[in-house]
Amino acid sequence: MREAVRERRRRPGTSDGEADVRAKIAEMQGTDRALAERIHAIVRAEAPTLVPRTWYGMPAYSKGDQVVCYFRPAGKFKTRYATLGFSDEATLDEGRMWPTEFAITALTAADEARIVALLKRAVGPS
């Protein structure tokens, strides 16, 4: 929560979101760092309209001032897997119920393709 308060106190335009996200990723260990680096590369390549930033001290990507997706490392919350999550700003709607968070322990080419498809849906038409 302290990180979220610091993030809100920053004046607009005083932070370099890309540098902030890379710094958070650099603080991670092992698998978390590898997953975060790969997801960051995928988001930047496949959803260039999303702006990198930190959100509650985690790497996140926003459209305007609204977070669309984020990476929650396992180490931060002492869980057994990292998570790629999407906010309600993401347009992932499928009927009346759909997933918004995905557990990740490793990434295969098929997993990366699924992330790309989710990102394209989340961002919506360009």
Image: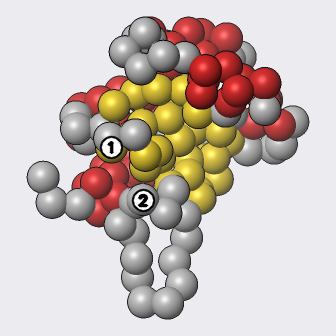
Question: What's the residue type where badge 1 is placed?
Answer: Lys
**Mark positioned earlier in the residue sequence (2 or 1):** 1
Task: Please indicate whether residue 96 sits to the left or right of residue 56 in the image.
Answer: left
Residue depicted at x 40% and y 60%: 90
Dot 2, crowdedness within 10 Å: few (<14), some or many (≥20)? some
Residue depicted at x 56% and y 52%: 85
Q: Position of residue 1 (x, y in %)?
A: 78, 32
Could you tell me if residue 37 is visible in this image? no
Question: What's the residue type where badge 2 is placed?
Answer: Glu
Circle 2 SS class? loop
Residue depicted at x 51% and y 56%: 87
- Report which quarter residue 8 is drawn in: top right
Asked whether the residues under the numbered discs 2 and 1 touch, taking CB atoms below 8 Å apart as contact, a structural biologist would say yes
Q: Is residue 4 above or below residue 96?
A: above
Report, in whole angstroms, how far the alpha carbon at label 2 lies from the one at label 1.
Answer: 9 Å
Q: Which residue is mark 1?
A: 63
Q: Which residue is mark 2?
A: 89
